[in-house]
Amino acid sequence: VPRWLPFGSGTDQAAIILLGLLNYRQQNSATPSDQLMKLMEAMGEGIVAMQYGDAGKAPFGAILSFDNGWHAYASDQSYALLRAGRALNKPAWIATAKREVDNFYPYLLGEGFLESFTVAQTGNDLTFVKQSHFSQIAYGIRPMLWATLELYAQTSEARYATQAAKLATWFLGQNPARQPMYDPATGRGFDGILSASQINRNAGAESTIESLLAFQRLEQYPAVVEALK
């Protein structure tokens, strides 16, 4: 694993750093320093190095979060690679993100989403050794939604609008608990799905902010909003 990443392989933290550096670069018209560009390169290449599997092999193009595990919360790796890849002309970064969105996200949809998993290596292949479905939170769904919407923005391919709509329905009740996780009347986002029959109806800052970020971004894409109807 790329030990130069935060905490020795933390791609979730690297994604946040990469997005922050990209915003800094875009807001400062002066030529970016070599130090800034080297740090962005390191974060991006480290994220790419943590991707495993493909359409037919576990974990199906997932970008692992840390060492041999993945967790849904703060999983902005593909969104960061898509944004930075476009800005810095890094087609390999975009291809990595596309591989996750095209293969891993549909797998998660088919599984009713996951909260986390770990993998082990057997020969050249990885296998799941532990999977957890709960708890599911808005901070685990919003990153996937943003990445899919970013791919739709970059490609104009209708399938990404369709996939984004499917991800968004988690907030509206198409989830394991079959209960809405977002209240459009108040803007409140509920704190999580605890099991197939129970949700946490508290509405903390994180869940509310992540829910609002999801729907504010969705509203920029009429085709996705139409697919939700």
Image (spheres, grey):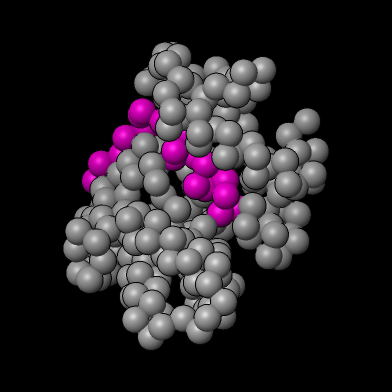
Question: Which one is in front, 134 or 153?
Answer: 153
The answer to whether residue 175 is above or below residue 160 is above
From the image, which quarter does the C terminus lie in? top right
Seen in the picture, residue 30 relative to 125 is either above or below; the reply is: below
Relative to the observer, which residue lies in front, 159 or 74? Answer: 74
Report the side of 166 relative to 108 (left or right): right
Q: Residue at x 36, y 28 (%)?
A: 135
Query: Is residue 89 in view?
Result: yes
Q: Quadrant of residue 217?
A: top right
| Residue occupying the point 57% across, 77% down | 29
Question: Going by the image, does 163 lie left or right of 46?
Answer: right
- Would you say residue 227 is visible in this rendering? no
166 vs 11: above or below: above
Q: Is residue 86 left or right of residue 107?
A: right
Question: x, y (%) of residue 100?
Answer: 49, 59
Pick the quarter of the image with the N terminus.
Answer: bottom left
Residue at the image position 52 percent from the left and 24 percent from the top:
189
Q: Quadrant of residue 212?
A: top right
Left or right, 60 with reference to 103 = left
**In this figure, what is the number of numbered marks?**
0
The span shown in magenta is: 127-148
- Asked if 106 appears above or below 94 in the picture, the reply is above
Query: For the point 51% across and 58% down, which residue is it?
Result: 79
Q: Is residue 111 covered in magenta?
A: no
Instruction: Work out whether residue 169 or residue 202 is closer to the camera in this orientation and state it.
Output: 202
Picture coordinates of residue 111, whole percent (x, y): 47, 37
In the rendered image, residue 207, in percent from the top left (x then y), is placed at: 46, 29
Give the image quarter of residue 35.
bottom left
Query: Does residue 132 belong to the magenta stretch?
Result: yes
